[in-house]
Structures are given as structure tokens and as C-alpha cells.
Amino acid sequence: VHPRRTGPVLCNGGSSMAAVVGNPRLPPSVMDRWLWGPMPSAEEEAHMVADLLGCQPLAGPAATKERVMSALTQAECAHFATHISWKLAALVLTPSQDSGSGPVAAAPSGGAGGGESGVKSNYTIPESLRVPDDASDAESICDSPPLQEFLLTAADILDLRLPTKLVVLG
């Protein structure tokens, strides 16, 4: 067994690098909206593969898109134990820590016309788009980070010159 090192590291032969990703941590709003739950067995898988390759996996909150893309630029082999969205043609990763609450901010409690910032908004939600509060997932949409923050798509890696020769989707 090889001692663990951080990030992608040289594999057994000393000539190639590996990137291992498992069980990205998702906010509850994303899990509820897309039905992607925690994957403890995927994290175990990532740790087992990383042990075999002698590297430290990008697991849980460390499995951000930025870190994964950085690791892929150096990796000849990559192992993903994550959710896959076939509908969106993407691997699901951990949103960046600085992504905040997404692109939509909540209105001040004073209503749509004011607030302390002095900025007034005349926008109101059309009646046809309103849904009762108890049946709405509008709050979870507003609390969700943008998809590009945590989905790794072919478009994201298309222009990169990756040395990756083997990719495993677990």
C-alpha cells in the first residue's frame, strides 16, 4: 500500500498521474430538486481506488469543479464515483464554496418597492407563474447554485489538452 499524498500524484510506475473523485457534497436544494442524494458507497469507492493508486481522492466538499478540472490537466487516468446527469450530459460535482446562494437573491422583507439600498424594483411575478407557497420549489431554485458551478460537461473540457488516457465512471 502506498502512502497517501494530496492531489493527483504519480501512480505505481512513477510515470503517470491519477485523479480520483467521489461523493461530491451537494446543497439540500440541489439534492431535492434533482433527486441526487448522498453517495457514501461512492466515497468508499473513491478511497479504495485512491489507496490502490497511492493518491488522495477529491471527495465530499473537496470535489469542486475547479479542483477536478485542475487535477484532470495532470492526470493520465481519472476515476469518477459521482452522480451522472444523462439528461444534462454532465458529471455532478461539489459547488464552489464561494458560489453563494445562486444567481437570484431574495427580496428584502420590506417588499418589492424598497429596502435600505434605495434600489426599487417594479418586477412582479405574473399570476400564471405563481404557485402556492406550500407546493413551491421556488425557494430551492433560488437557493441553488448555478448549474455551471457544479456540472462538469464535455464543453468544459473540450478546449483543454488533457493527458487523460483512461476515464472510469463508477
Image (cartoon, grey):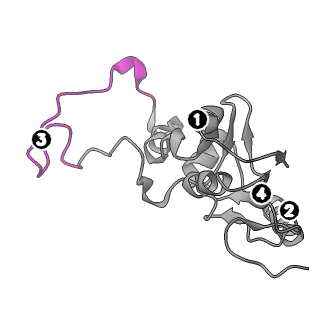
> Which circle's residue, 1 or 2, is located before the other in the chain?
2
Q: In 3D space, how far apart are the residues under numbered discs 4 and 1 (Cα atoms)?
A: 30 Å
Q: Residues within 10 Å of mark 2 (few under 14, many from 20)?
A: many
Q: Which mark is first along the chain, 2 or 4? A: 4
Q: Which residue in the structure is indicated by mark 2?
A: 45
Q: Secondary structure at mark 4?
A: loop
Which element carries disc 2, helix, strand or loop? Answer: helix
User: Does residue 48 appear left or right of residue 93 in this picture?
Assistant: right
Q: Tell me the residue at 75%/50% (across/down).
A: 82
Asked if the residues shown at circle 3 and circle 4 are in contact, with their CB atoms under 8 angstroms apart, the answer is: no
- Residue at figure coordinates x 83%, y 68% from the top left: 14
SS class of the residue under badge 3?
Answer: loop
Callout 2 amino acid: Glu
Query: Which residue has dot 1 on it?
Result: 159
Residue under the image location 18 percent in, 47 percent down: 110
State the CA–CA distance, disc 4 to disc 2.
10 Å
Mark closer to the observer (3, 2): 2
Asked where in the image residue 67 lies, by quadrant, the reply is bottom right
Location of mark 3 (residue): 119
Q: Position of residue 21 (x, y in %)?
A: 73, 58
Residue reaching furthest left? 118
Q: Nearer the viewer, mark 3 or mark 1?
A: 1
Q: Are marks 4 and 1 in contact (CB under 8 Å)?
A: no
Q: Which residue is mark 4?
A: 39
Q: Quadrant of the N terminus?
A: bottom right
Relative height, residue 33 to residue 128 (above, below) = below
Per the rendered image, the range of residues in magenta is 109-131
Between disc 1 and disc 2, the foreground one is: 1
Image location of residue 79, percent across then percent down: 80, 53
Q: Earlier in the sequence, mark 3 or mark 1?
A: 3
- Which comes sooner in the sequence, label 4 or label 1? 4
Asked if labels 2 and 1 touch by Cβ distance under 8 angstroms, the answer is no
